[in-house]
Image (tube, rainbow, N blue to C red):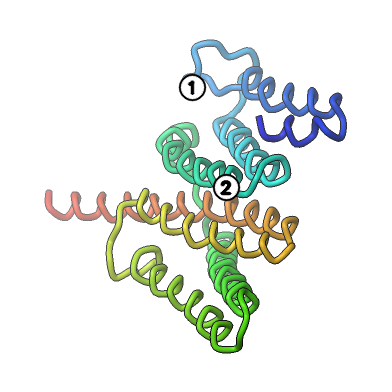
Amino acid sequence: MATPWALASHSPVLAGVALLLLIGLPAVFATPGDKTQVPVAVPGWVTVALVVLQLLAAVTASWAAWPVPVALLVWALVIGTIYSEIPRWRRLTGGDLVATGPAHLVNEGLAFLFELLALAMLAWWGATVGSGLALHLILGIGTPLAAAVVWGLFAAPKARVALPLAGVLAVKALVFGSAMICLDVLGHRTLAVLFGVLVTANTVIATLDREAAFLKVDVSRWTGMNR
């Protein structure tokens, strides 16, 4: 609903087209076995791509159409949807929906870059909010430091506290969502939206890779126990 809502004030026609595409494409193009009725059969990765397209559209349009708290709620729901969709995506692609080789390294590098950018946004906000040099120093240093500690404890690849995937995604949503709020408060909503879209896409790929790694470890352990 966010995309038609955002476009309605600019062009009702575009809003109608967006609504038709976002609802019509998944209804027409489907993977056999995923739905009872399949008007046009497509491979599993196409169905996954259509879902990801809907999620990215929701993240982008919600910031343009609704207040920040509502947009953040949408972004959190998108992260939750990614988590709940993973078993279905794995089934649709035969378990092969992971980044390998150079693609994996690029995505991991981008994930690290986005983490640094989130900390930079928090520091930027902290250094400008309120008045007085002391407050700027405390918030400018303390805010990103607190976020880095939370990330290192719960969301890093080698986190000290092992959380289930849902918990890791919740921590990521908290840190990245806070960074997006800070960037929006600083008057850069377009950059906040772009950051949210890129982070969402990166999180989808990273989450699939992480799940694949967990499954590989579990399979190895099970195989070792039965030898």
Disc 1 secondary structure class: loop
Which quarter of the picture shows residue 109? bottom right
Q: Is residue 35 visible?
A: yes
User: Would you say the residues marked 2 and 1 are in contact, meaning their CB atoms lie under 8 Å apart?
Assistant: no
Decide if residue 164 is on the left or right side of residue 72.
left
Disc marking residue 69: 2
Residue 28 lies, with reference to residue 6, above or below; the image says above
Task: Give the mark nearest the N terminus, 2 or 1.
Answer: 1
Residue 227 lies, with reference to residue 147, above or below; the image says above
The outermost residue toward the bottom is: 133
Residue 124 location (% of width, % of height): 63, 76
Depth order, front residue of 202/171: 171
Decide if residue 36 is on the left or right side of residue 161.
right
Residue 59 location (% of width, % of height): 63, 44
Depth order, front residue of 24/99: 24
| Whole-number angstrom distance, CA of label 2 to CA of label 1 | 34 Å
Residue 226 lies, with reference to residue 33, above or below; the image says below
Which quarter of the picture shows residue 178? bottom right
Amino acid type of the residue that numbered disc 1 sits on in the rendered structure: Asp
Amino acid type of the residue that numbered disc 2 sits on in the rendered structure: Pro
Residue 72 location (% of width, % of height): 56, 48
Disc 2 secondary structure class: helix
Q: Callout 1: few (<14), some (14-19), or many (20+) C-alpha neighbours within 10 Å?
A: few
What residue sits 52% from the left and 57% below the top?
100
Disc marking residue 34: 1
Q: Callout 2: few (<14), some (14-19), or many (20+) C-alpha neighbours within 10 Å?
A: few
Q: Is residue 102 visible?
A: no
Residue 78 location (% of width, % of height): 53, 42
